[in-house]
Amino acid sequence: MGQDMKKIRIGIVGAGNIAQSAHLPAYRTLQDRAEIVAIADLNRPRAQDAADKFGIPAAFGSVEEMLANSALDMVDICVWNGSHAPVAIAAAQAGKAILCEKPMADCLEHALQMEREVKKAGVPFMMAMVSRFGGEQQLLHDMIEAGELGDIYYAKTAYIRRRGTPLGWFTDTKKSGGGPVIDIGVHCIDRTWYLMGKPKPVRVSASVSRRIGNYQTKGVSRWIALDRDVTAFDTEDSAAAIIHFENGASMLVEASWAINAKPDAYTQICGTKAGATLDPLVIYGENEQGYLTDNQPTVAKYNGFEAELAHLIDCLQTGKPPLAPIEDGITVQRMLQGIYDSASLGREVCLD
């Protein structure tokens, strides 16, 4: 790190699983460029436990207490979806840069409130869209940008869990805003939309179900929130949607926590010159002799969270724009909202 590059001082809000299993370990690889100076959680003992575990100097019981008593450059938001907006607004009003875990908020209205306050304060903001930062993802994005796949006119993407309903706040709409659409479908939608060149979404048609998500199946693993006393289950457990874009392209999306189908996770991109799938990356094309080809590039593997956080720190230190700006968070939230609105109304909806 150059002598003129000061360390970015970070406060974490939320001491749950995403903070302790992903963000905090990733920050350890950036100790020459960033330092965690505080962590806050409504469960103050949990914040203190995380502070002790990760060597964080201060622990607090609220974001307000942390902002008032810590010298911070940036706030990293790792709380449940329904708290993203109030935490982000408090951080923006305090003049702090912001990293916000996906999705941007529990609903479009709250996301728009965040956007207004962030832009009013003029603080840097990045969405933690970690799926944009994989090696295969970035290589495919570069190939598409270079025109190697031609015009992208169709994509389909899915995250299918056969039995994978998370425990805790995820199944409580008041805290989460929804089920697999807003939890894991957001990854599918964001990375696919990003690869498609971020066209403007204009229409959505969707259906959601809540049939078997509150299962008692034995021998299956789950993502578990540290707040395990939540008993509400009022979200969907599976969903399907088609999103249409202004440029004529479309995206088919499936997301489920629980469905009697083979587990799967994929993104497929179709262009006029070639197509591609991710996980693993395969390019489906045609050579100069007119024969079909399937090529699998060799791509270095690296941790997406580490790459995401390193990118943000670089942006804060150099002034470069982030890869996932607030405007992208709003557009993805519009698509999520459109899925829920379409399913609720039982018809296709137009997006403003």
Image (cartoon, grey):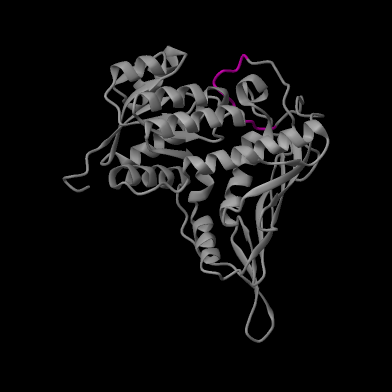
Left or right? Give the position of 322 relative to 129: left
In the depicted structure, whether residue 198 falls above or below residue 104: below
**Which region of the structure is painted magenta?**
220-229
Q: Tell me where residue 46 appears, x and y as whole percent.
A: 44, 16
The answer to whether residue 264 of the structure is visible from this angle is no
Foreground residue, 330 or 294?
330
In the depicted structure, whether residue 352 falls above or below residue 138: above
Foreground residue, 149 or 237?
149
Left or right? Give the position of 80 relative to 96: right
Give the image quarter of residue 310: top left
- Name which residue lies at 82% across and 38% down: 347
Total numbered badges shown on the rendered structure: 0
- Name which residue lies at 78% across and 31% down: 344
Left or right? Give the position of 105 relative to 178: left
Q: Tell me where residue 61 appears, x and y as whole percent.
A: 41, 13
Magenta stretch, overall SS = loop
For the C terminus, which image quadrant?
A: top right
Foreground residue, 184 or 320?
320
In the depicted structure, whether residue 135 falls above or below residue 24: below
Q: Is residue 251 magenta?
A: no
Residue furthest left as drawn: 3
The answer to whether residue 24 of the structure is visible from this angle is yes
Give the image quarter of residue 111: top right
- Name which residue lies at 48% across and 50% down: 133
Give the image quarter of residue 4: top left
